[in-house]
Amino acid sequence: EHKENDQLVEDLFAIYKPILLQELNSDPENLEKDFEAGRHIANAVNHFQMEDSHLLENLRLKLSQYKNHLSELKLRDQLLSRQGIRTLNQIRIISDRILSLSGYPFYLVALLMNYLPYKMGKGAADKLAKEVEFHASINLTVGWISWLAYYFLQLLLVAVLFRSWSLLGIYAMAVPLTGFYALEFQRFLKKSAGRRRLFRLRARDKVEFEGLLIERTELFSLLKVIGAPCGCG
């Protein structure tokens, strides 16, 4: 209800909504449950804007400081969860490295098959979307049309060069499958890189590492208030 709270709500969606869904034993892939959790957060912000604006400002300040600290360290909040810290060890770092090296050649092939239309969709949305609400629809439309054109161009090239129906069929199935692989592998690369940075931080600067955990704990004590029933439904 208050435009000045838009960024706060977006930040709460990114950091606290996954935790809220977990506490409510809700499937994060369930769009209805995801929407309900988001609505609960928005309603809570509206409620505390009216009833306890001081608490909301305190939350805004702590969340902004925590976000900036994570950004400086190139980390994400999920890495600092109890499960993330518990599984952060040398074996995990080594296994991440092995999987990264073994999967990277396939990732490069997948990028060659799919990256251009992916980039075109985002580039068009960045240029044409005057409002953030239209970014996703423009990205999707341009990306989908570009991908179809790029897809059939590749099929035509394979057909002309190899003149084999079986090879053409295999390639036709490989292109979309490698696209999904590229997306998942890219997420894995980002997560594994974050785990390495956090592992190095814990090994080299325990004071800052512990300080970051304390900062997160203080923030989440405030977030518990947002997650609690507040009569603001």
Image (cartoon, grey):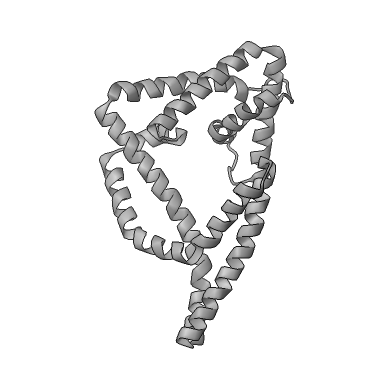
Can you tell which quarter of the image residue 51 is in? top right
Camera sees residue 173: yes
152 is higher (above) or lower (below) than 210: below
On the image, the x and y values in percent for residue 7 come to 61, 29
Camera sees residue 81: no
Which quadrant is home to the C terminus? top right
Q: Nearer the viewer, residue 104 or 230?
A: 104
Instruction: Tally the numbered discs.
Output: 0
Q: Residue furthest front?
A: 127
Which quadrant is home to the N terminus? top right
On the image, the x and y values in percent for residue 10 come to 61, 32
144 is higher (above) or lower (below) than 214: below
On the image, the x and y values in percent for residue 198 come to 34, 34
- 232 on left or right of 65: right
On the image, the x and y values in percent for residue 174 come to 49, 71
Can you tell which quarter of the image residue 217 is in? top left
Residue in the picture at 49% in, 55% down: 183
